[in-house]
């Protein structure tokens, strides 16, 4: 009897949308897997075409979608994702997990006025309708957004605070916890910043916005641990967009502690409009040393803007691909991504599951029968 292959599981396959290909390649390198084959085209009238070039039947599919402003406008990229999900679902995969390092529209998470939409909830529901079964993201703007996903589609939020904390220790000159404070940009970011303070074992301060009188322009005041005279102040935020708020916080911290060196660290870096010019002005005025973000969003476009104003070296990028790789292998193997054993892994800690990931696609899913069955004796 000829050898047969008996399927005993659901082989993993990773696809990515055209944006931030570099992040996707780093993720699959950690896993020692390969990127799935798919073709994206745009017709002359602007319509998008997506065609799978391999079978995904019975596969455990992961789709990575990360913003890249050099590759395409974000709404166009989200439409590419939705069409890709529909194409995948039509080929009967076992499961589709969408990896969104940054959830777009995240700041539209509540109704400030009647008639406004809750856009991130709509976005997640659209993806589930298109075929998504599960979501993975990093550092939501509002943790309540994890409840926006439909009940049957889990959304797992990871945090990169250990990766950012490790970067701070290595990149801030002469870093010492006793001479360092972390600063929240507002009350909404206080919880996130306190976690970073605990991770770094440093002091905490907060910038508080208020209006002295109704109708007057808001001011920024500093709430600080007066017993500490810091050498370094690290401003923590979940995202940097136009950086208008960052300018006000840096100015307030500098006026309060003129001797301290100020750094800014966040997860998601958009750097829209004239953000690069604002940061260049702070660098020139010696009020800000540098700004650091992760590669959840591709930094190719921001780096071009920073180069144009002569501060390319002032934008630092922290790689979080290993964090996402660890989550992907655990989801695939049926392990939790919420256990402390995984959550406490930093960039310098070995990940035992990643070390075995290379063997997953080839050895775990097929059994080869004997080349020939024994013939019964007469």
Image (cartoon, rainbow, N blue to C red):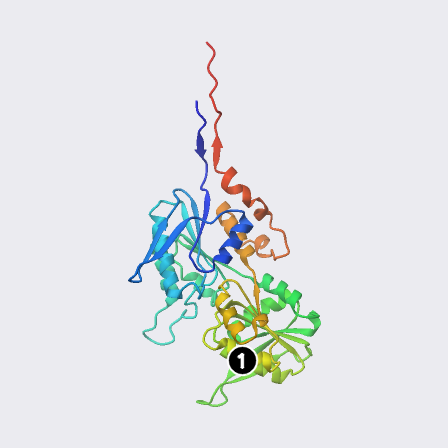
Q: Which residue shows up at 48% across the image and 32% down it?
A: 367
**Which of the 4 image quarters holds residue 198?**
bottom right
- The N terminus is located in which quarter? top left
Residue 145 in picture, x, y percent from top left: 44, 64
Q: Which residue is mark 1?
A: 247
Count the marks: how many? 1
Kindly tell me whether residue 327 is visible in this rendering.
no
Q: Which residue shows up at 47% across the image and 22% down it?
A: 372
**Above/below status of 11 relative to 179:** above
Q: Which residue shows up at 59% across the image and 64% down it?
A: 164
Residue 116 in picture, x, y percent from top left: 34, 73
Residue 290 in picture, x, y percent from top left: 60, 73
Q: Is residue 91 left or right of residue 337?
A: left
Task: Give the residue at the far top of this rendering.
Answer: 378
**Above/below status of 1 relative to 362:** above
Q: Which residue shows up at 44% across the image and 32% down it?
A: 6
């Amino acid at each position: 009897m000829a050898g047969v292959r008996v399927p005993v599981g659901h082989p993993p396959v990773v696809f990515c949308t055209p944006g931030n290909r570099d992040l996707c390649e780093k993720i699959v390198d950690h896993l020692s897997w390969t990127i799935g084959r798919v073709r994206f085209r745009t017709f002359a009238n602007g319509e998008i075409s997506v065609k799978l070039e391999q079978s995904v039947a019975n596969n455990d599919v992961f789709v990575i979608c990360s913003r890249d402003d050099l590759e395409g406008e974000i709404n166009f990229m989200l439409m590419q994702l939705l069409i890709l999900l529909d194409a995948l679902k039509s080929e009967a995969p076992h499961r589709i997990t969408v990896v969104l390092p940054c959830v777009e529209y995240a700041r539209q998470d509540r109704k400030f006025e009647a008639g406004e939409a809750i856009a991130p909830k709509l976005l997640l529901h659209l993806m589930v309708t298109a075929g998504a079964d599960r979501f993975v993201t990093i550092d939501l703007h509002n943790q309540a957004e994890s409840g926006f996903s439909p009940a049957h589609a889990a959304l797992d939020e990871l945090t990169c605070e250990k990766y950012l904390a490790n970067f701070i220790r290595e990149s801030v000159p002469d870093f010492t916890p006793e001479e360092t404070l972390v600063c929240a940009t507002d009350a909404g970011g206080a919880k996130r910043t306190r976690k970073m303070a605990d991770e770094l074992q440093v002091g905490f301060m907060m910038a508080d916005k208020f209006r002295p009188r109704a109708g007057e322009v808001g001011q920024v005041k500093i709430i600080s641990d007066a017993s500490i005279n810091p050498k370094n102040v690290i401003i923590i935020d979940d995202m940097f967009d136009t950086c208008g708020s960052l300018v006000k916080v840096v100015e307030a911290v500098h006026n309060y502690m003129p001797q301290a060196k100020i750094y800014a660290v966040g997860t998601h870096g958009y750097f829209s409009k004239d953000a690069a010019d604002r940061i260049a002005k702070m660098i020139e005025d010696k009020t800000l040393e540098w700004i650091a973000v992760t590669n959840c969003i591709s930094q190719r476009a921001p780096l071009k803007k920073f180069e144009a104003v002569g501060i390319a070296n002032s934008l630092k990028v922290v790689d979080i691909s290993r964090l996402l790789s660890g989550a992907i292998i655990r989801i695939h193997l049926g392990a939790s991504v919420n256990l402390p054993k995984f959550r406490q892994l930093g960039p310098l800690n070995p990940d035992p599951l990643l070390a075995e990931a290379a063997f997953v696609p080839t050895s775990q899913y097929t059994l080869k029968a004997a080349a020939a069955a024994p013939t019964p004796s007469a």
